[in-house]
């Protein structure tokens, strides 16, 4: 009994779908057409990635032979708020600088990227914005937000310790150029910051050296001064100060989006689902009429 009911139910289901096959075909075709249109209307995007290795958590911060002395005379370093290179947050600082809003805004301004990022709102011939309201015109702040949310992404691989910076843009050459320039700007920013910090420390240590005649303290200070001089030398001689480039940014020949085949397949599936749903949702009287119409057409064709 149960088997017979199941067979009848499946038969009714199949008969209902068959009687409304034209509706299902039309819904699927319409959805497929919309999917194709969307797939080819969406702008093409390309990704360019650069793989980076942080130069250790102790970049510019190794104490060398002064470490033992500093453990004995640590009060010297704490005076005046000196930072003599604990190094625990060097990697975090480098990643934060790479994603810094200030650095990104400066990058956008220096390269005059507003007309590029907001090309649709820019009149290249007149070199003016097409948006008349100044409050709605693009600004470096808005561009940085766009960069952060849709263009730049940074991935920190906890297993390998490598950092991947990815730029997504419609022009593959610009994407590769921006990725490389952001890394170079980050290295330059951190290198300049480290040199300035070491120089401040040197100035302070030299002042303290003049104020003491205790041999032990003088020895400790000389060790710390030597360490700061080494930091300045390392920073001045290292282009890749914070990040070493493991795999440089390359110009991609394959778009990352849109995934046209996937969009079309999903559209066809959605259209088929909607068509079947409408087929079962039609009133019974309309279903009977549609079934008779199909049979009449079949007889006429014969």
Image (cartoon, rainbow, N blue to C red):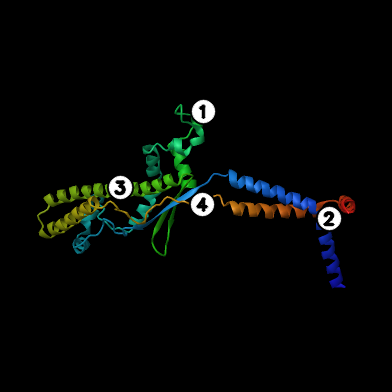
Is 195 located above or below residue 140 in the figure?
A: below
123 or 161: nearer the viewer:
123
- For marks 3 and 4, the one nearer the N-term is 3
Image location of residue 227, percent across then percent down: 19, 56
- For marks 2 and 1, the one nearer the N-term is 2
Q: Which residue is mark 3?
A: 188
Mark 1 to mark 4: distance in Å? 35 Å
Mark 2 to mark 1: distance in Å? 57 Å
Image location of residue 275, percent across then percent down: 75, 52
143 or 91: nearer the viewer:
143
Residue located 21% across and 48% down the image: 199
Q: Could you tell me which secondary element the residue under label 2 belongs to? A: helix
Q: Could you tell me which secondary element the residue under label 1 belongs to? A: loop
Quadrant location of residue 144? Answer: top left
Callout 3–callout 4 Cβ contact below 8 Å: no
Mark 2 to mark 4: distance in Å? 42 Å
Circle 3 residues within 10 Å: few <14, some 14–19, many ≥20: some
- For marks 1 and 3, the one nearer the N-term is 1
Which mark lies nearer to you, 2 or 3? 2
- Residue 256 marker: 4
Q: Quadrant of the N terminus?
A: bottom right
Q: Could you tell me which secondary element the residue under label 3 belongs to? A: helix
Which mark lies nearer to you, 2 or 1? 2
- Residue 133 marker: 1
- Residue 242 marker: none
Q: Which residue is mark 2?
A: 19
Q: Could you tell me which secondary element the residue under label 4 belongs to? A: loop
Which mark lies nearer to you, 1 or 4? 4
């Amino acid at each position: 009994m149960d088997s017979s009911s199941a067979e009848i139910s499946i038969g009714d289901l199949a008969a209902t779908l068959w009687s409304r096959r034209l509706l299902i075909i039309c819904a699927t075709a319409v959805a497929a057409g919309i999917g194709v249109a969307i797939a080819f209307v969406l702008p093409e995007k390309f990704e360019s990635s650069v793989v980076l290795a942080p130069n250790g958590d102790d970049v510019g911060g190794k104490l060398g032979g002064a470490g033992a002395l500093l453990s004995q005379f640590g009060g010297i370093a704490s005076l005046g708020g000196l930072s003599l290179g604990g190094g625990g947050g060097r990697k975090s600082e480098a990643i934060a600088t790479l994603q810094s809003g200030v650095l990104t805004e400066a990058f956008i301004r220096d390269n005059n990227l507003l007309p590029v990022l907001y090309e649709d709102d820019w009149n290249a011939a007149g070199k003016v914005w097409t948006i008349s309201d100044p409050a709605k015109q693009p600004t470096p702040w808005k561009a940085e937000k766009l960069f952060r949310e849709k263009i730049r992404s940074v991935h920190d691989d906890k297993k390998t310790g490598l950092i991947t910076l990815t730029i997504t843009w419609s022009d593959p050459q610009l994407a590769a150029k921006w990725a490389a320039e952001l890394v170079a700007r980050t290295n330059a920013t951190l290198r300049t910051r480290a040199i300035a910090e070491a120089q401040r420390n040197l100035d302070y240590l030299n002042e303290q050296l003049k104020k003491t005649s205790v041999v032990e303290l003088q020895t400790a200070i000389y060790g710390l001064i030597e360490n700061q001089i080494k930091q300045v030398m390392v920073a001045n001689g290292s282009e890749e100060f914070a990040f070493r480039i493991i795999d440089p940014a390359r110009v991609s020949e394959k778009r990352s989006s849109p995934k046209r085949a996937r969009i079309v397949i999903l559209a066809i599936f959605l259209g088929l689902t909607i068509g079947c749903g409408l087929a079962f949702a039609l009133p019974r009287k309309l279903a009977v009429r549609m079934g008779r119409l199909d049979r009449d057409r079949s007889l006429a064709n014969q």
